[in-house]
Amino acid sequence: MKRLVDASGGDANVWSDRRQAISGRLPQPASHELARGREREDDDLDASRVSSDGAGQFHGRLFGWHRSAVDALTTRDQLGSDLREVILYVFVGVGPDGQTMIEEIVARLEHALFEVLEVDDKAIGVQLRRLQEHLEFPGMPVDVDARTSVPADMVCEIDVDALTNAIHGPHPIVREVRLSPDGARSGVVGGRIIALVRPLLYTLCLSQIGRSMRFLILAVGVLVASAVLIGCAEEGDAVSAPNPVEDTAQVGSDVTVVDVEQLQGDATGPDGDASETLLSGPDDEFSQAGCALMQGEKTAPIAGSTAREAGQQVLLPNYDSGFVVALPESGIGFVTLEVPDWQVVLAVYTTADVELVLHDPEDKAEVVQPLSWAAPCAEQMITEERTKFHKWGGFTLEIRGEPGGEAWLAAIDLPLE
Amino acid sequence: MARCYRSALGVGARLLALGLLLGACHGASGTEEEVVSASALEVELGRHLFYERRLSVEGNRSCGICHEPALGFTDGFVRAVGSTGELHPRNTLTLTNVGGRESLTWTPDAPDSLEGQLLVPLLSEHPVEMGLLNTVDEVLEELRVDEVYGELFPRVFPEDADPFTVERLADAIAAFERTIVSETAPFDRFIAGDTDSLDTEARRGFDLFFSHRLRCATCHAGPDLDQPTEDGEIVARHGWFNIGLYDVDGQGAYPDRSRGRFELTGLEEDMGRFRTPTLRNVELTAPYYHDGSGATLADVIANYAAGGRHVIGGPNPGDGRENPHKSDLVRGFEITAQEALDLEAFLRALTDWDMVEDPAFADPWPRD
């Protein structure tokens, strides 16, 4: 077991200037939430659990982008499209092969499509209820062969760690999302139709009822769906608050370009409280060790100014000292983080005004604890993120901070057992 | 090496490459006998030891874990990390065709026999690599009672009263390492007459590599593409060059602990001179250079095209292109973007997948 240090033994004064510089620009951690933060449990390192936790967070965001784009369209366009889709269901339901076709539709809905996207070589898993071809990440390959089913109540799931975090908001590597108005129309509002009609289809599929009864049930479904749609449309018309999507939407053009960076600041919610992502409590021994390193003596590496220069400055995770990394005038520096073992979890600490981007072109790492406040030293605006590396080697670490300034870092490896 | 004779003899005198290859093969006498003399059993013992993690103080390193076949028998680190987490000052060299080498490290500061050299990572303390100096006897006792080694050691060394010694351990590992031979890369098939083995890009890259304009083969000649030439003739088994990577003081200095032969001789002319590495499997052995500071093949090509590397940021800024100790052979050249891609395609044609994926070189131990 590596030696752990009591974080409380650090000199708090060293933080006064730094904290003052940081605070005010960033959301503050909630002390009362930190105080009752739970301790790390074994399943904290379970990647699937973390991903699932984050999915809901991104769900709202992704859906929000769609919603906004749809709002930019006319109500008539939406209604026309969605009613056509409902009528199609009715037609199918009362047709001569209605039972078979309904079963096929149900099967299709049950087998949602799974897309794997890559953003700047960072793999992002996206689960969608169905293939929404209108959603594009320009310049990023999409593996449409990787498909899996998802629960019926899940609109979409995405590896939020790659896109957004509670401290900084959307990830800077996501430059834009292109949204086709046509696709958005059928993809989002049509999704609501499916949600409404689905129970009816199930009913029809499971019960051997006559054609006239099926028609009656579907007709009722159409009426309900139409009413809901009209309500949605009116709600959309009533939305007058500006949003980033509307600002850039170009109705009638082929694509709508959304600058995700304009959305920064939303991730922590309106009150800026990031405590909901807190995963390690103040007594977590590794967080304490990381905090102690951040408050103790540090070595002073100098970051390269380009990714090509990252190899000239190697940082090795350790329990002996943190790092004060000098950044170039651009404010974006590059170093190499040497991961010393296979299947190791690294906890990386920095201050909230510094953003770290791990370059992982071969997809050898996964975030197992998203960026959050480091509980023992959250008052000092120190953040923590834990990443599991499946394989060792040198990883380029991009450090974004104050131009010509310095970034305080610490990195430790956690035993898996 | 016997295999390189076969590769070269089918080529004829078609290209400069052939002449360089033949010259080098004739100069590589002695290694063939060594390969033949290594019994299959000794090689198998060596393979087990090569992947034996008990040979590291923390049980987390072996020869094979730091010379991984999938990475062209390197480790993927910028600079190697030892068993105790200590950072090595150098990038890990490949073991591809290591049996034919007369110098085994970036600078000639280690024994030049495989048996002698492998004791350095095994026992060294500065830096600690496998860190076995103080526990090697205990480990040998563990091997003595091990089911596999308990049988293999006495059979491989029947004349020894006690074969469980560091020397015998080194003999076996070295015997295995000598079998790590690359001879079936597309490049090998091409120079043996199979013109279809290189695609169009790689073929253009081949021509560029051996062209007078780029002159890559001036330093990267011979069967392993690591031998220096003069006037088209190979002049030595190894070359030592300053290729203009750094100039930290404006007078040609390289960073501390990375000064090449200068660290041994103290001569200014040896500043930054490191051994030319083989280009075999170079696609897999990133990052590059003695300190791993070259991330990609594209970066390396760009640096040569520029006549050296101009470092803007980081701990060692300076214009390596102006390094006064830089080799005259690194002059820079004009190259188009497509030509750079072609050259890269040729370098990828040096990847010997048959060898990399050969089960004979794989880890014999079951892993979790």
Image (cartoon, rainbow, N blue to C red):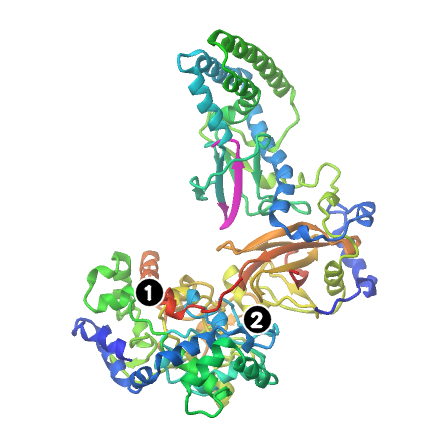
Q: Which residue is rendered at x = 23% and y = 78% of the image?
A: B5
Question: Is A403 in front, or is A94?
Answer: A94
Residue B305 appearing in the image: no
Q: Quadrant of the C terminus of chain A?
A: bottom right
Q: Quadrant of the N terminus of chain A?
A: bottom right
Secondary structure of the residue carrying numbered label 1: helix
Give the percent coordinates (x, y) of residue A150: 54, 35
- Write down the chain letter for disc 2: B
Q: Give, as a three-letter code, the residue at label 2.
A: Asn
Residue A398 appearing in the image: yes
Give the percent coordinates (x, y) of residue A369: 66, 51
Residue A23's place in the image compared with B242, above or below, is above
Residue B60: which disc? 2
Q: Is residue A182 left or right of residue A338?
A: left
Magenta region: A118-131
Q: Which residue is rendered at x = 49% and y = 43% of the image?
A: A117
Pointer 1 residue: B354
Residue B270's place in the image compared with A407, above or below, is below
How packed is label 2: few (under 14 Cα within 10 Å), some, or many (20 or more)? some
- Write down the chain letter for disc 1: B
Q: Give, as a three-letter code, the residue at label 1.
A: Asp
